[in-house]
Image: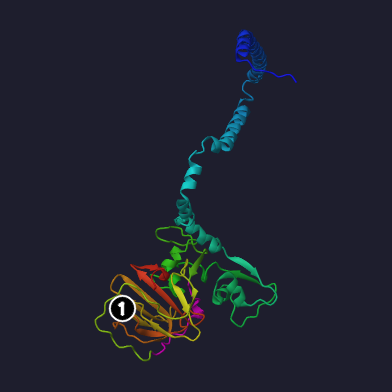
């Protein structure tokens, strides 16, 4: 067996002898690489010059005939490059870091839509204000169709000139409105106020016709309407379908509470389940209970309205002014148990749940108002 013994002195001497030769070889390689790149570059540049001169000659001979298409193509190419490569080139390098380090901010943004997002959601919810056609299927009933579109049966009856006794036939076409109410064709001399009054809306309630985002006017300041155009009357009632104007007698009046002071917080005015929440053109909540039940004042205050004052709409109602900027309304009562001017405490009985006025079942329509604005009761009830 031959043993190899490494001698550092011999290796160092051998390396020092080969160093000049290696350096010389590297220099020769770099000179060759430079000359090769230079010669190849000149060849490519020469070919480019020939191509460029050919294009210039063509454009010159045609006296600008192809200049416009050439510029258009160049512009389109530039836009394409900006659209495709722009996000990559100008991407914020801290974007990923910011998203990773701020998960709470990202979540808050996702669940806090702005006004325009909410408005768009309402538009989608009510089908953009369009009147659609429903083709009746075998075995379908009016109540099933109304539930499918989130409407009351009366809305479908009024729009299609039907009665509650009308029997639907398979293949029959029904016009379906986007919201509960009446669709009206404007006649000569009519205004939004006369139209609103015709369908059971007083002067202030006619504002709903204006606020409905899919109604159009000739003048957005005076709300001028054109003869022959259609207007949607949210919560309107067909004149022939008005409820009788008789007043149901109030029984067992609640005694006056004397000096009262509002607490500033509201209790639930009735027991039951919420059948309709605060939304678009129903800025209130409906609390239903098949067995009815008592209605109590949500907070202390003075009764300003009591009874069936107009023969339709809310039916028997009670309105209480709480003296602190808030006003509450309790509608569709079967009986009213307070008088106008009477003072009531929080929790005092003011009436009985019913189905008077424009109502399709026993329930309470409850509103909270402040400065004329209708607030969401679910944000204030405790």
Q: Residue at x 48, y 69 (%)?
A: 234
Residue 26 at what x, y percent from top left? 63, 12
Q: Quadrant of residue 303?
A: bottom left
Residue 244 magenta: yes
Magenta stretch secondary structure, dominant: loop
Range covered by the magenta-colored residues? 235-249
Residue 279 magenta: no
- With 350 as the anchor, is 235 left or right in this view? right
Q: Residue at x 36, y 91 (%)?
A: 252
Q: Residues within 10 Å of mark 1 (few under 14, many from 20)?
A: many
- Pick the residue in front: 23 or 71: 23
Residue topped by disc 1: 300
Q: Residue at x 64, y 69 (%)?
A: 134
Q: Is 376 situated above or below 320?
A: above
Q: Quadrant of residue 168?
A: bottom right
Q: Residue at x 42, y 69 (%)?
A: 206
């Amino acid at each position: 067996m031959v043993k190899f013994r490494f001698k550092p002195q011999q290796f160092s001497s051998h390396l020092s002898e080969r160093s000049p030769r290696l350096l010389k070889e590297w220099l020769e390689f770099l000179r060759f690489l430079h000359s090769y790149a230079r010669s190849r570059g000149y060849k490519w540049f020469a070919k480019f010059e020939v191509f460029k001169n050919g294009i210039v000659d063509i454009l010159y001979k045609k006296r600008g005939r192809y200049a416009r298409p050439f510029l258009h193509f160049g512009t389109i190419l530039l836009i394409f490059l900006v659209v495709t490569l722009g996000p990559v080139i100008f991407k914020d390098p801290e974007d990923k870091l910011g998203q990773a380090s701020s998960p709470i901010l990202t979540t808050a943004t996702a669940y806090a839509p702005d006004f325009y997002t909410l408005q768009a959601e309402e538009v989608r919810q009510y089908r953009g204000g369009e009147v659609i056609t429903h083709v009746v299927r075998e075995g379908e009933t009016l109540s099933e169709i109304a539930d499918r579109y989130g409407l009351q049966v009366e809305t479908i009856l009024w729009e299609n000139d039907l009665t509650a006794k009308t029997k639907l036939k398979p293949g029959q076409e029904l016009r379906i409105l986007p919201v509960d109410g009446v669709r009206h064709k404007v006649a000569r001399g009519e205004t939004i106020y006369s139209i609103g009054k015709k369908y059971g809306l007083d002067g202030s309630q006619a504002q709903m016709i204006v606020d409905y985002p899919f109604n159009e006017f000739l003048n957005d300041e005076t709300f001028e309407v054109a003869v022959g155009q259609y207007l949607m009357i949210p919560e309107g009632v067909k004149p022939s379908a008005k409820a009788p104007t008789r007043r149901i007698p109030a029984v067992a009046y609640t005694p006056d509470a004397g000096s009262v002071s509002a607490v500033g917080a509201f209790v639930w005015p009735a027991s039951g389940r919420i059948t309709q929440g605060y939304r678009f053109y129903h800025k209130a909540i409906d609390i239903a209970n098949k067995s009815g039940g008592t209605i109590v004042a949500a907070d202390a205050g003075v009764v300003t309205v009591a009874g069936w004052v107009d023969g339709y709409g809310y039916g028997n109602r009670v309105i209480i002014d709480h003296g602190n900027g808030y006003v509450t309304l309790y509608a569709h009562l079967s009986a009213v148990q307070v008088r106008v001017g009477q003072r009531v405490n929080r929790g005092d009985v003011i009436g009985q749940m019913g189905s008077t006025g424009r109502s399709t079942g026993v329930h309470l329509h409850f509103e909270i108002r402040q400065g004329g604005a209708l607030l969401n009761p679910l944000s204030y009830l405790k």
